[in-house]
Image (cartoon, rainbow, N blue to C red):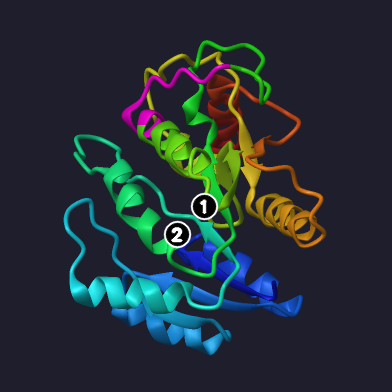
Amino acid sequence: MRQISILGCGWLGLPLAKSLLKKGFSVQGSTTSVEKISVLKKVGIVPYIVTLSAVEVSEEAANSIEKFLKNSEILIIDIPPKLRGNSSENFVGKIQNLIPFIENSSVKKVLFVSSTSVYSDDNPIITEESVPNPDSESGRQLLEAESILLNNKNFQTTIVRFGGLIGEDRHPIHFLAGRKNLENPYAPINLIHQEDCIGIIETILRQAQNDSLESNEIFNAVAPFHPTRKGIEIALTGIRRK
């Protein structure tokens, strides 16, 4: 179980792949950008161009997906729904079209990176036993994609629902600074740092290697503190004034 395929070597997938390489794993990684192939190769990732589609998969795309999954027992799916604004993307359709390729591959375990957006904003306390009730299109499609993967008996699926992703180059200051009339300003925000996400995924992988991971497990993962949107905005205003 030393080879892993990571579908989506982006903001989280790429540093995760780098960390796994340091720990002795071989990593096959996907990107949709030809320009990024050299970036993946440079750090030791075996790169593939993989573009998922909600419509019929072309022969070229199918060959690429098959090679990307070949000889990997674990698949990490880390691709965002891209459903902000007026986007009409069919994320669920993409996952449905991916399923037959997983079924016909060596993959036995799937780790799907999801989001706490599958819960509604009005839930005060959330646990893994809470019933999801998404109030955004992104959350709804993520929840449906989760269900499709969890209900497939050909492989074991683990779901990790991360809060808002932050890191050195992704901070609340970038999406709250200067904004007026914040929606639901005193609602708590669930955030989690990139390094913590990587640590959690690696812990799950260790459990998978030791066969101590229960089938179809779901984990919520956020930081232990929950600032409000308004609280962050006030703090940022103070920083700007200094």
Q: Quadrant of the N terminus?
A: bottom right
Question: Where is residue 203, by image quadrant?
Answer: bottom right
Which stretch is magenta?
Answer: 131-140
SS under mark 1: loop
The tag on residue 145 is none
Q: Provide the residue designation for mark 1.
A: 154
Q: Circle 2: is it few (<14), some (14-19), or many (20+) Cα within 10 Å?
A: some
Q: Residue at x 63, y 53 (%)?
A: 194
Q: Residue at x 18, y 69 (%)?
A: 58
SS under mark 2: helix
Is 137 part of what is drawn in magenta? yes
Residue toward you, 2 or 178: 2
In the image, residue 187 sits, relative to residue 108, either above or below, namely above
In the image, residue 184 sits, relative to residue 176, either above or below, namely above
Q: Residue at x 58, y 29 (%)?
A: 232
Question: Where is residue 225, by image quadrant?
Answer: top right
Q: In the visual, does 78 lie left or right of 98?
A: right
- CB-based contact (under 8 Å), mark 1 and mark 2: yes
Q: Provide the residue designation for mark 2.
A: 103
Instruction: Kindly report the secondary structure that dominates the magenta region of the rendered protein.
Output: loop
Residue toward you, 234 or 224: 224
Where residue 214 sits: x, y (%)?
Answer: 73, 42
Q: Answer whether residue 31 is visible to the viewer in this image.
A: yes
The CA distance from mark 1 to mark 2 is: 6 Å
